Amino acid sequence: MTISKHSDQFSTAGQIKVEDLTEIAAAGYQSVICNRPDAEDGASHAGSAALATAAGALGLKFAYLPVVANQITAQDGAAMQQLLDQLPAPVLAFCRSGNRSTNLYRLAQASAAETATAQIGNRSSAFEVVIVGGGSAGIGIAASLLRRRPDLQVAIIEPSDHHYYQPAWTLVGGGAFDIQKTVRPMRSVIPEQAHWIQAAASAFEPDHNRIKLADGSTVHYKQLIVCPGLRLAWEKIEGLEQTLGKNGVTSNYRYDLAPYTWQLVSSLKQGTALFSQPGMPIKCAGAPQKALYLSCDHWLRSGVLNNLQIEFNNASAVLFGVAAFVPPLMKYVEKYNAKLSFNSNLVKVDGERKLAWFDVKDQDGHITRQEKSFDMLHVVPPQVAPEVVRNSPLADAGGWCEVDQATLRHPRYANVFALGDACSAPNAKTVAAARKQIVVVAENLIAARENRPLATVYDGYGACPLTVEKGKVLLAEFGYGGKLLPTFPLDPTVARGSNWFLKVSVLPWVYWNAMLKGREWLARPTKN
């Protein structure tokens, strides 16, 4: 028995025997469809009745949809699609050689697409393009698509009432930005032409061009854009959730906690301040040390830095992933007299006792658990792909939405694109990356709709404005492989006051008034 896998949900095979069903069940299949007529070739093969009985005994669902070779109709494809909608997946369909089952599957896919197209304009649950996620990437790509094609029927699936400008939360934690200016009502940022579905996606079903929502409803699409962001896994650090926002434990990675960071920083006069960074990938890999630098700068200016013991615990083995920026950053580490602890991962917190535990790996790979006391602890949580992506056929081995890193299209589902923090491209997970990915996805998705080559290529661009002190920023811009991609003709390894103005004043304005409006200022990827 030779099985041909067409997707994670569907496979085909030639004629099977009753004894093959045990192997089929062991391989994880949930349903079997017989597409070969019982009387074909003088009924010399296992019949559907015997196969159905044996399948039932093994817990497999069985369906009989016989078709004659070279006489398959569109109605047969629709019937096949109906079975695929009803039967639990993965499904194995078979005929004499597997060819009829394969052709039926193709007709079924065409039938599903035609059904979705017919539903567009008649039902709010079917659209030409569906975007999952209303964050920076989701709103930005919706706006860019609608600027290019104003008549495109676009839906955004997003449960939240509010939209946040997260890059400013580090500034809030350093006393340099108003937290209220980082949030707006979701309704105010969604493009007027887009349809907002205020619900959470619970399952992707790309073989059927549909998404299940948490309320039990279904949304159909012709093309899908996946950008739900990532999930902050606070629960992976024992005891953390019980003490966040009190006992000196804070994080700039949450809207309600960034002001508490500044409260702690501005009131701390002596003692120990610990800063943590988990293993990669995380949102903006520079953000954990930005908190360190801005805090130290305040303590230095306040004359209390010498009364503090400061330690940066990094689960990684290096200070920053792009080597060119390490020397200038080390000058600030030395200026602030901060201790660096590499391969040190925060695993447990007891806020009431002001204790934190780190798993520290030595050069031989051995791990020991170390207890450290603190007066202030700034935590960056582990970060993972959302479960709705991780548990779907769209996911790669790491749980992220799989994409071709150049075109940002899914390698197995040609009508699916992804961008932002949830996609598998090996770039830094930053708003700056999403800003350039938006152009790539918008142009390539439209090219796919119009049967043109996908000509726009993503270079892996990401940017991390490293706030090394209040008033100066080291603007790290880089692409795949750590290649430096500076926007301006200046030495990117030098911290500048102009970059501070860019970070604090220009970029927030650009975000709200350009990126989320489909205006692509300096957003095109570089030419190869």
Image (cartoon, rainbow, N blue to C red):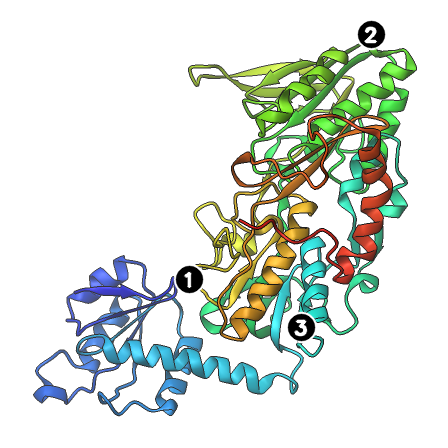
Considering the image in quadrants, where does the N terminus appear? bottom left
Horizontal and vertical percent for residue 522? Answer: 72, 51
> SS for tag 1?
loop
Q: Would residue 118 be found to the left or right of residue 50 on screen?
A: right
Badge 3, how many Cα within 10 Å: few under 14, some, many 20+? many
Mark 3 highlights which residue? 154
Q: Nearer the viewer, residue 139 or 513?
A: 513
Cα separation, mark 3 vs mark 2, equals 56 Å
Looking at the image, how many numbered discs can be counted on the residues? Answer: 3
Horizontal and vertical percent for residue 377? Answer: 74, 23
Q: Is residue 267 visible?
A: yes
Mark 2 highlights which residue? 306
Q: Of marks 1 and 3, which one's residue comes earlier in the chain?
A: 3
Q: Would residue 383 be found to the left or right of residue 168 on screen?
A: left
Residue type at the position of mark 1: Arg
Badge 1, how many Cα within 10 Å: few under 14, some, many 20+? some
Q: Residue 467 occupies which quadrant of the picture?
A: top right
Residue at the (64%, 42%) spot, across then down: 462
Q: Of marks 3 and 2, which one's residue comes earlier in the chain?
A: 3
Residue at the (67%, 71%) spot, across then down: 155
Residue at the (24%, 63%) spot, across then down: 24
Instruction: Look at the picture and state if 94 lies above or below 428.
Output: below
Mark 1 highlights which residue? 412
Residue type at the position of mark 2: Asn
Cα separation, mark 1 vs mark 3, equals 23 Å
Q: Would residue 437 be found to the left or right of residue 180 on screen?
A: left
Q: Nearer the viewer, residue 259 or 282?
A: 282
Residue type at the position of mark 3: Val
Residue at the (65%, 62%) spot, across then down: 200
Q: Would residue 41 be found to the left or right of residue 405 on screen?
A: left
